[in-house]
Amino acid sequence: MITEYGVVTKANPSSAWVKTNRTATCESCASRENCGGHGITEMTVVVKNNLGVKQGDQVVIGLQSSPMIFLAFFLYVFPILFLLIGALTGNAIAPLFSMDPSVCALALGGTGFCIAFLIIRLSHSRLSRKDKYKPFLVRKGAPPSQSCQAAQQT
């Protein structure tokens, strides 16, 4: 599970807005520029308020890893598979239509690639509504360095 620490900036009984800072976890992500803007160190995430948090609370938000692996496959590998299947099919059936195999492979490969992106686009709204692809509140609490400092000060 991927976790980040944050501070609740706004809350109501159903939702909480959590401000987080990009950390090393974000820096190693291939899609870091697509999740709040390139060069921005802070971002706000809306999560379900299942812990009853209120404004000012320090929390840990999480995101399950396995759904993210599926999404990475779906967005990056799926179109390439359709491209390859289309190109191989075009190359195989070209002699049946007395066509140049390269041209047929190019046409069907491009078509397969476009079909894959159409499938992704049509699946987007359905997938974005599923809770397993959304961040969630894990627990209340400060990052370990802050909680240790607070304990030492008392």
Image (spheres, rainbow, N blue to C red):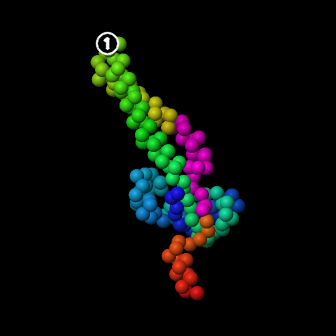
- Which of 32/24 is in front? 24
Q: Residue 125: give x, y in percent of width and height.
A: 57, 41
Start-end of magenta stretch: 121-138
Q: Of the residues shown, which amino acid type is indicated by label 1?
A: Ser
Q: Is residue 113 above or below residue 30?
A: above
The reply, left or right, for residue 49 in relation to residue 102 is: right
- The residue most toward the right is 13
Q: Report the quarter where the C terminus lies.
A: bottom right
- Kindly tell me whether residue 110 is visible in this rendering: no
Residue at 46% from the left image edge and 63% from the top image edge: 22
Q: Residue 53: give x, y in percent of width and height.
A: 66, 66
The reply, left or right, for residue 102 in relation to residue 82 is: left
Residue at 51% from the left image edge and 58% from the top image edge: 2
Q: Is residue 88 above or below residue 52?
A: above
SS majority, magenta: helix
Q: Is residue 144 above or below residue 117?
A: below
- Which of 154/103 is in front? 154
Q: Is residue 152 above or below residue 46?
A: below
In the rendered structure, does residue 126 fall within the stretch colored magenta? yes
Q: Residue 151: give x, y in percent of width and height.
A: 56, 82
